[in-house]
Amino acid sequence: MKIAVLPGDGIGPEIVAQAVNVLKGLKLDLEMTEAPIGGAGYEAAGDPLPDATLQLAKEADAVLLGAVGDWKYDKLERHLRPERGLLRIRKELNLFANLRPALLYPELASASTLKPEVVSGLDIMIVRELTGDIYFGQPRGISTLENGEREGINTMRYNESEIKRIGRVAFDIAMKRNKKVCSVDKANVLETTELWRQVMIELSKDYPEVELSHMYVDNAAMQLIRAPKQFDVMVTGNIFGDILSDEASMLTGSIGMLPSASLDANNKGMYEPSHGSAPDIAGKNIANPLATILSAAMMLRYTFNDETNAVRIENAVKKALADGYRTADIYTEGTKKVTCSDMGAAVLAAL
Ligand code: NAD
């Protein structure tokens, strides 16, 4: 099983090192090879996605990624910025399905900004389309109009087959969970999402056991805070999913807890924490590595079909939390504040 390990920037190398240690702790036959991406790619090869990195990722069965980005690259031309490397690798590997679970560990109920009774027992899977929508639609750009005024354009677009394939991922996952899919759109004002809704309804005929509901994105943003436990699987487009999944992450206490998987049609996947490179805390060994470690568990589950070892990792994380270990972002009084590497060691010990 070949894994391309792409630590990236900021806290990326610190958190990925912990996930790699945990994977090694399983004593499986894993071949892990590291390569630079994002700002690290730009430093190494003048490109946020160097050819050699892309090649390695293409040849691997799965990719484990830290995060990319740093404020010091904000002045670079757009195509050289770290985030472009990430968008490109997703596109090149055709990773159209982004799975982001928002699961609240009972031990962290008090770390959430919401009342424990609102969030305890929370277990949502957000399925976000990742390769289409306004982030990729053409035409795009900033141009100057005849009157000298500047205008910015982006284009929201989805075709039927793109909607269908992400819908299938959501319905298939719902079949293994509580059989509820909530499709999020803005069908009252955006034609693209009017089509989205039509296709979801058509697709639902293949899944008679799954209860399909629809919600406008503005209401979904509100409901996630008001009564998040009403959701099982949420499926939505790229931009709405980007925003809602970050919102959902806060329900669980910290963005440092949330893993993600991005899959292609054959379950090859890229696995990464939902958060960014956190330049504000990089190099201090205080980041929370659990989202990355849990991403490695998702890798075993979705790409390597190894539920047993995925659950072993997840149980080891639960054990470390139950034993009171907390990084600064999830620390509450009465628990043990530990560093990034100590948290990784605690999970490894629990394993
Ligand atoms: P961010 O997710 O990096 O950080 C937001 C806040 O959460 C910060 O206060 C940070 O310290 C904290 N945080 C994030 N991860 C944490 C962890 N594991 N443990 C403890 N605290 C954590 O988002 P941002 O500040 O908006 O962006 C910073 C950089 O990351 C930017 O360059 C941005 O483009 C990039 N970014 C990358 C990705 C990615 O690689 N997938 C995603 C989002 C942002």
Image (tube, grey):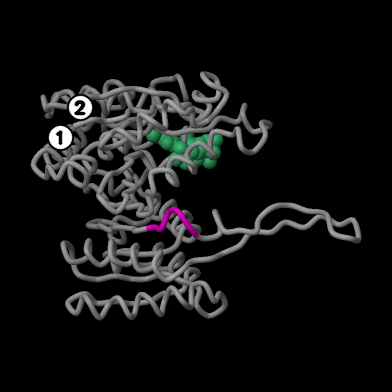
Residue 73: percent from left, percent from top: 61, 29
Report crowding for label 2: few under 14, some 14 to 19, many 20 or more residues within 10 A (C-alpha): many
Q: Residue at x 43, y 53 (%)?
A: 130
Residue 329, compared with residue 24, is above or below; it is: below
Q: Which secondary structure class fits the magenta region best?
A: loop
Q: Tell me if the residue at label 1 has its CB under 8 Å from ligand 1.
A: no
Residue type of the residue flagged with mark 2:
Val
Residue 342: percent from left, percent from top: 27, 21
Residue 295: percent from left, percent from top: 28, 39
Residue lying farthest to the left in this orientation: 308
Q: In the image, is 16 to the left or to the right of 247?
A: left
Q: CA distance from mark 2 to mark 1?
A: 10 Å
Residue 263: percent from left, percent from top: 31, 49
Which element is circle 2 on? helix
Q: Residue at x 8, y 42 (%)?
A: 308
- Residue 333 visible: no
Residue beneath label 2, please?
A: 22
Report crowding for label 1: few under 14, some 14 to 19, many 20 or more residues within 10 A (C-alpha): some
Which tag, 2 or 1, sits closer to the chain's start? 2
Depth check, front residue: 224 or 109? 224
Residue type of the residue flagged with mark 1:
Ala
Depth check, front residue: 24 or 250? 24
- Which is more foreground, mark 2 or mark 1? 2
- Which of the labelled discs sits on residue 316, or is there none? 1
Q: Are marks 2 and 1 in contact (CB under 8 Å)?
A: yes
Span highlighted in magenta in the image: 128-132
Residue 288, compared with residue 271, is above or below; it is: above
